[in-house]
Image (spheres, grey):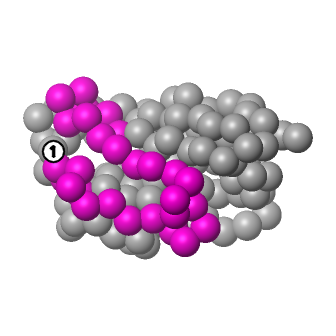
Amino acid sequence: QVLLVESGGGLVQAGGSLRVSCAASFGRSFSLFAMGWFRHALGKERVFVATISVRGVTTYYANSVNGRFTVSRDNAKNTVYLLMSSMTFDNTAYYYCAGGRGGISVVAEGYIYWGQGTQVTVSS
C-alpha cells in the first residue's frame, strides 16, 4: 500500500516561513514519481501549488506563490518538501502532497496517490 504522509504544518505569522514535508512509502520507486503540492482552503476549491519532476530538475509553481514558495525533493529519503516564505493570510489551507507517474502536472488528475494533508494557518 502506498502512503504519503505530510508533516510540518502549523501556525505561522504573516510574513514568516514554514516548511512542510511529505514522506512517501514508494520505496525505491519514489524516484519514478513526479510530486505535487495542492492546497484546500475552507470554502474554496482545491488548487495547485507546486510540482517537481522525478529528479527534481524541473519545478513549476502557481502564479500566486511563484517566487515565495520552493518545492524540493530528496529521493534518498523518499521525501518532498515545500518551503513557504513571505506567507500571507490567503496561504491558510490544508496542504496535500500527491504523486504521479505521468510527469509534472498542475491538475489533480495528474496524480494517483494523495496524502491526508497538513493544516497551515497564517496569523497576524
> Could you tell me how many numbered marks the image carries?
1
Question: At which x and y percent is residue 5?
Answer: 43, 33
Toward the viewer: 70 or 34? 70
* In this view, 104 is above or below 53: below
Give the x, y percent position of residue 11.
74, 32
Asked whether residue 77 appears in the rendered view, the answer is yes
Other residues around mark 1 within 10 Å, as few (<14) / some (14–19) / many (≥20): many
> Is residue 4 depicted above or below 41 in this figure?
above
Q: Which of 120 and 2 is in front in this view?
A: 120
Q: What amino acid type is highlighted by mark number 1?
A: Ser
Q: In this view, does 3 lie to the left or right of 90?
A: left
Q: Main secondary structure of the magenta part?
A: loop
Left or right of 123? Residue 111 is left
Percent across and percent down for residue 110 are: 33, 69
Highlighted magenta segment, given as a residue range: 53-80
Q: Name the residue under label 1.
A: 31
Position of residue 70 measured from the top left corner of the image (x, y, whole percent): 45, 49
